Image (tube, rainbow, N blue to C red):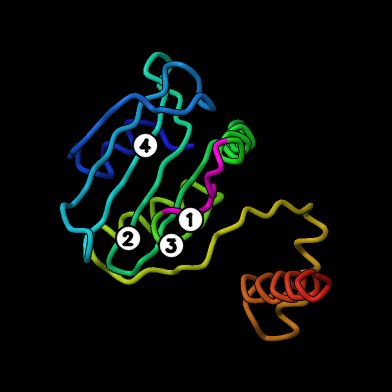
Amino acid sequence: MLSVKEWMGLVDYRITEGSEYGWSCYGNSAYTLDSWSGDNEGGHGFHIIFDTRTQEVFEVQAHDYKNQRAYRLVNADYLKKHNDEAYARGVDSVEAWDDVEYVTLDTDEDFLSKAESIISGEDYDTRVDMPLELDDELWFKLMKLAHEKDITLNELVAEFLTKIVAMHTDEK
């Protein structure tokens, strides 16, 4: 999970607001800092929620108003508590604003890559990076199969994941 220091560097230490976090899912010492570009049409906003005593980060958010996209990275130890509290409050836990939903990311690197592009106004990959842990034998088999199909390993894994998601989507 990103640290407060990494987030501060990302926003170039530009803080526009801050307050105690109003929900209890992150404990009594939760605080939120915001860094907003000042433009809801073509700008951006970044938010961090952390513990003021321990500096543990619970959640970071990136709001891309230009492209109407919102990303967040939530500390896995607290995601269920956050979602449970949202449900109890009658709040849609994935709605960022109006008709824009959060895309919950899995890695710091993916969040930082998207956030840096949002800040610089550059196009970025909207796909979500997913960590994948496989044993060496299976990696070798996948590399061999990718070679046989004359595609990259990433392309092969993306192809498999797309098929798996489609299968599960068709079942519903």
Q: Position of residue 116 (x, y in %)?
A: 31, 55
At x 44% / y 30%, what residue is drawn?
A: 57
Please name whichever residue, 27 or 155, is drawn nearer the observer in this view of the structure. 27
Frontmost of labels 3 and 2 is 3
Q: Amino acid at mark 1?
A: Tyr
CB under 8 Å between discs 1 and 3: yes
Label 3 packing within 10 angstroms: few (<14), some (14-19), many (20+): some
The amino acid type found where label 2 is placed reads: Asp
Boundaries of the magenta span: 89-96
For residue 24, the mark is none
Residue 48 circle label: 4
Q: Is residue 33 magenta?
A: no
Distance CA(mark 1)–CA(mark 4)? 15 Å
Residue at position x 18%, y 52% from top? 37
Relative vertical location of residue 107 with respect to residue 58 in this rendering, above or below: below
Per the image, the residue denoted by label 3 is 100
Disc ID at residue 102 = 1
Specify which label sits upstream in the sequence, 1 or 4: 4
Residue annotated with mark 2 = 64
Mark positioned earlier in the residue sequence (3 or 2): 2
Question: Looking at the picture, does residue 156 appear above or below residue 96?
Answer: below
* Disc 2 and disc 1 in contact, CB within 8 angstroms: no
User: Which numbered mark, 1 or 3, is in the foreground of this view?
Assistant: 3
Quadrant of res 114: bottom left
Look at 71% across and 77% down and name the residue there: 146
Q: Amino acid at mark 3?
A: Val
Q: Position of residue 128 (x, y in %)?
A: 54, 62
Q: Nearer the viewer, residue 125 or 37?
A: 37
User: Magenta region, mostly helix, strand or loop?
Assistant: loop
Local SS, label 3: strand
Label 2 element class: strand
Q: Position of residue 77 (x, y in %)?
A: 61, 31
